[in-house]
């Protein structure tokens, strides 16, 4: 039977921007330093201090909005969200409530080979809170993060499985990396997810009550928390079909405990009224010029999904190969740099993501660590394509390139007699004669129209030359002899 339930998930993704200073002060925006060293009067909320907006943070928010084809608002403003908690030195957060800088937009991704488009409700700028650090008998406050710039991206409730949610979150991460707007380091909390989850019968259109899971910082936690919550809600509705929905799933904010995979209630749902939002009196509106927005649009880098389509459609790479290349921007950039010197994208891609990546040693995370100029890999691939070397010799040359990254493959080949292919036509013809003699039934098969027999004979010749015969000459010699 088909699953009668459909999850409805909306994500709020907090992305910490990689600006040098904080959103409203010149204090350094840097993770991992001694507690309370990256602070100023402004981030610690000293009386009389006034915020000054960071231009670079605004730029990155606009770039994200453009990347997802959202509407960039030439005028937006900040609001004050009041809440008392020890990690909030001012007792309020400066955020954007009803007038965000970006609204709308969408992200398209391929999931299981099919393109899916997920809508974005809005994206806004806000400042981060400080952090509490818990020790055995006390807790400390570290305000290094207080006032760090965030873009919060709020999706529409259009995600219908934990897989969709993870794919959307991963796509946001990749876009931010392509824009160089964030380091997206999840272990350091640069990317944090809140999820709103409800479920409903597949034919229902209305939404049932939802709960919120706060502050997850890995894709794995996001996926398991959603799975847990979806099953919990299904169980409740199944066990108590006649009870009102509101009595089964009551709104609240939970956090996910990954160690026992359980959701822990933090607080019953608060309403916007609880936060007493009002326009931030210490800051003017964010006013943008259309020319500024246009110039940022004109200088956007190629985005992950566009690159994916170029690789699969224009270059004919496999979906798998294209995904490997786009998921690491520097690897894709490297491939593109090599592609400028080589006209065989599929073979080039294979040499980069299989052959050279397979030659990485422990601790080397990317082919970039090999320090081989991309045009050298392009040259190697062209040499194979032109029949100048066999793929067996190419593998040996590749080994040498790894040990001597400065040497071009042409130089390596020229300096080592073992790497010159056997292209002496007379010598190859003698070997072909020998092979035909030893495999006369195979030759008869070929003459009877069996093309496979030909490949077998080529293989035999290659074997006798230990992979060094020029495939072109072998082919010609074989065809000639077989047609005699
Ligand atoms: Mn937020």
Image (cartoon, rainbow, N blue to C red):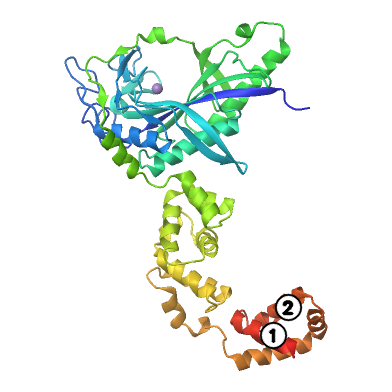
> Is the C-beta of the residue carrying label 2 under 8 Å from the nearest atom of ligand 1?
no
Looking at the image, is 384 positioned above or below residue 355? below
Secondary structure at badge 2 equals: helix
Residue 237: percent from left, percent from top: 68, 13
Question: Toward the viewer: 305 or 405?
Answer: 305
Q: Residue 41 placed where, x, y %?
A: 19, 22
Quarter of the image where one finds residue 376: bottom left
N-terminal of the pair, mark 2 or mark 1, is 2
Marks 2/1 in contact by CB < 8 Å: the verdict is yes
Towards the viewer: 434 or 9: 9
- Callout 1 crowding tier (Cα within 10 Å): few <14, some 14–19, many ≥20: many
The residue labelled by disc 1 is 478
Callout 2: 10 Å neighbours few (<14), some, many (20+)?
many
Q: Is residue 407 left or right of residue 431?
A: left
Classify mark 1: helix, strand or loop.
helix
Q: CA distance from mark 2 to mark 1?
A: 8 Å
Vertical comparison of 365 with 246: above or below: below
Q: In the figure, is residue 399 to the left or right of 161?
A: left
In this rendered view, identify the residue nearer to me: 85 or 190.
190
* Residue at the image position 51 percent from the left and 64 percent from the top: 348
Q: Quadrant of the N terminus?
A: top right
The numbered mark at residue 377 is: none
Q: Which residue has dot 2 on it?
A: 454
Residue at the image point whose x is 32% and y is 28% from the top:
145
């Amino acid at each position: 039977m088909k699953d009668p339930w459909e999850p409805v998930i909306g994500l709020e993704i907090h992305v910490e921007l990689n600006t040098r200073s904080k959103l409203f002060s010149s204090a350094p925006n840097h993770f991992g330093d001694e507690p309370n060293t990256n602070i100023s009067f402004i981030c610690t909320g000293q009386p009389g201090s006034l915020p000054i907006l960071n231009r670079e943070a605004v730029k990155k928010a606009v770039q994200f909005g453009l990347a997802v084809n959202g509407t960039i608002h030439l005028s937006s403003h900040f609001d004050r969200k009041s809440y008392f908690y020890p990690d909030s030195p001012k007792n309020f957060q400066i955020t954007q409530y009803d007038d965000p800088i970006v609204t709308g937009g969408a992200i398209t991704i391929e999931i299981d080979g099919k393109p899916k488009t997920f809508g974005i409700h809005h994206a806004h700028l806000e400042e981060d809170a400080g952090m509490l650090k818990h020790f055995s008998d006390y807790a400390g406050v570290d305000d290094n993060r207080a006032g760090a710039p965030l873009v919060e991206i709020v999706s529409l409730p259009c995600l219908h499985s934990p897989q969709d949610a993870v794919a959307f979150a991963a796509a946001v991460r990749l876009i931010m990396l392509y824009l160089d707007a964030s380091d997206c380091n999840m272990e350091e909390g640069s990317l944090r997810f809140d999820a709103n989850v409800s479920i409903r019968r597949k034919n229902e259109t209305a939404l049932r009550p939802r709960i919120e899971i706060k502050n997850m910082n890995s894709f794995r936690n996001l996926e398991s928390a959603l799975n847990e919550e979806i099953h919990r809600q299904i169980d409740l509705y199944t066990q108590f079909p006649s009870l009102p929905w509101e009595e089964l799933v009551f709104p609240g904010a939970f956090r996910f405990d990954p160690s026992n995979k359980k959701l822990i209630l933090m607080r019953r749902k608060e309403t916007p009224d609880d936060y007493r939002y009002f326009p931030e009196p210490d800051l003017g509106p964010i006013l943008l010029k259309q020319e500024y927005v246009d110039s940022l649009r004109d200088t956007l880098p190629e985005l992950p999904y566009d690159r994916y389509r170029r690789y699969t459609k224009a270059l004919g790479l496999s979906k798998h190969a294209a995904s490997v290349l786009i998921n690491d921007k520097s690897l894709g950039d490297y491939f593109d740099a090599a592609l400028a010197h080589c006209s065989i994208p599929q073979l080039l891609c294979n040499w980069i993501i299989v052959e050279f990546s397979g030659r990485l040693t422990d601790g080397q995370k990317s082919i970039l660590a090999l320090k081989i100029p991309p045009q050298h890999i392009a040259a190697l691939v062209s040499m194979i394509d032109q029949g100048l070397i066999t793929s067996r010799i190419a593998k040996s040359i590749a080994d040498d390139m790894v040990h001597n990254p400065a040497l071009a493959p042409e130089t390596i080949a020229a300096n080592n007699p073992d790497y010159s292919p056997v292209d002496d036509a007379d010598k190859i013809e003698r070997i072909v004669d020998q092979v035909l003699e030893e495999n006369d039934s195979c030759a008869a098969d070929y003459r009877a129209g069996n093309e496979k027999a030909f490949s077998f004979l080529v293989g035999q010749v290659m074997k006798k030359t230990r992979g060094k015969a020029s495939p072109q000459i072998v082919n010609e010699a074989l065809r000639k002899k077989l047609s005699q």
